[in-house]
Amino acid sequence: MNKQQQYKLQPALYLVPVPIGNLEDITIRALKTLQAAHVIASEDTRTIGSLLKNFQIIPNKLLGIFEHNEQAGAKQVVQLIQQGNSVCYASEAGTPCISDPGLILVQACIAAGLNVIPLPGAIAATTALIASGCDTQHFTFVGFPPHKKGREEWLHTICTHTETIILYEAPHRLVSTLETIAKYAPQRVMCVVRELTKLHEEFVRGIAQDVHSAFAERATIKGECVIILDRLVSRTE
């Protein structure tokens, strides 16, 4: 990217998706927006810094805004935009606000009467869904399960839903989550997607009890995971 490719941005909050793994998945518009922005805010400045370096983009100003400082960060972003700056916000991976910080920033800008401009880009949930073999016409995305309190009840509830269910899970909790799903819906068809868009991308499909058994036999599990429970209602309806 060079300065000739730069274009002017209006003062606004730009929500910029970044790749979930493969850096080639970033869009041309996202790169131009990151290059032209007065300020780049990110959930993880190290991750966005590596991405910017890879594409030879030097940020004018870089801010770290994450879960525990988002309220204060939102006030700062509103002030920056009111002063005439364009501000990009990027998650560590994927799209802001989807199981990631960003909502408080968006709400603060809307309340202040400022423009919020979303860019399309990578989302692990729908990327996994379209290759899962599960029903894509009726689905609900539920994010991450609770870590402790209410966890089993939450998983029990999603197993009762008839539409396709998409959730995320960390690798060290995957087997436990699959065990609970298999407990309440052992015959439900499902797919677990691991390391999406990366070198060791993997899709494990089958009924819940078999998928749980497959992962329970592994010594280690790496990479963020997407779990998809297929729709229960007949697809011919």
Image (spheres, rainbow, N blue to C red):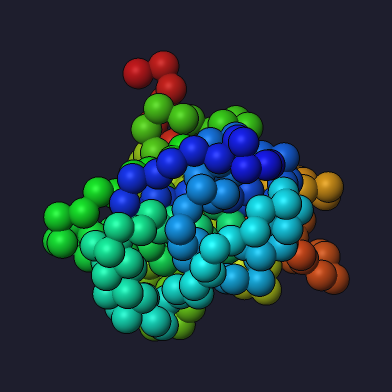
Which residue is outermost to the front? 4
Relative depth, front residue between 110 and 168: 110
Q: Is residue 51 visible?
A: no
Residue 57's spot in the image, x, y percent? Answer: 66, 53
Q: Is residue 69 above or below residue 31?
A: below
| Residue at 45%, 82% in the rendered image | 148
- Kindly give the residue lying farthest to the top in the view shown: 236
Q: Nearer the viewer, residue 48 or 178?
A: 48
Foreground pick, 119 / 232: 119
Residue 108 visible to an observer of this rendering = yes
Q: Is residue 107 above or below residue 12?
A: below
Residue at x 40%, y 44% (from the top left corner): 9
Which quarter of the rendered picture does the C terminus lie within?
A: top left
Number of numbered discs on residues:
0
List x then y, in percent, for residue 169. Answer: 57, 63
Q: Residue at x 59, y 71 (%)?
A: 45
Residue 86 relative to residue 63: left or right: left
Q: Is residue 33 above or below residue 130?
A: below
Q: Could you say where residue 36 lies in the image, as x and y percent from the top left?
A: 51, 48
Residue 145 or 37: which is nearer the viewer?
A: 37
Instruction: Name the residue: 49% across, 38% down.
Output: 7
Q: Position of residue 86 (x, y in %)?
A: 38, 54
Q: Quadrant of the N terminus?
A: top right
Q: Is residue 9 left or right of residue 214?
A: left
In this picture, residue 170 sits left or right of residue 16? right
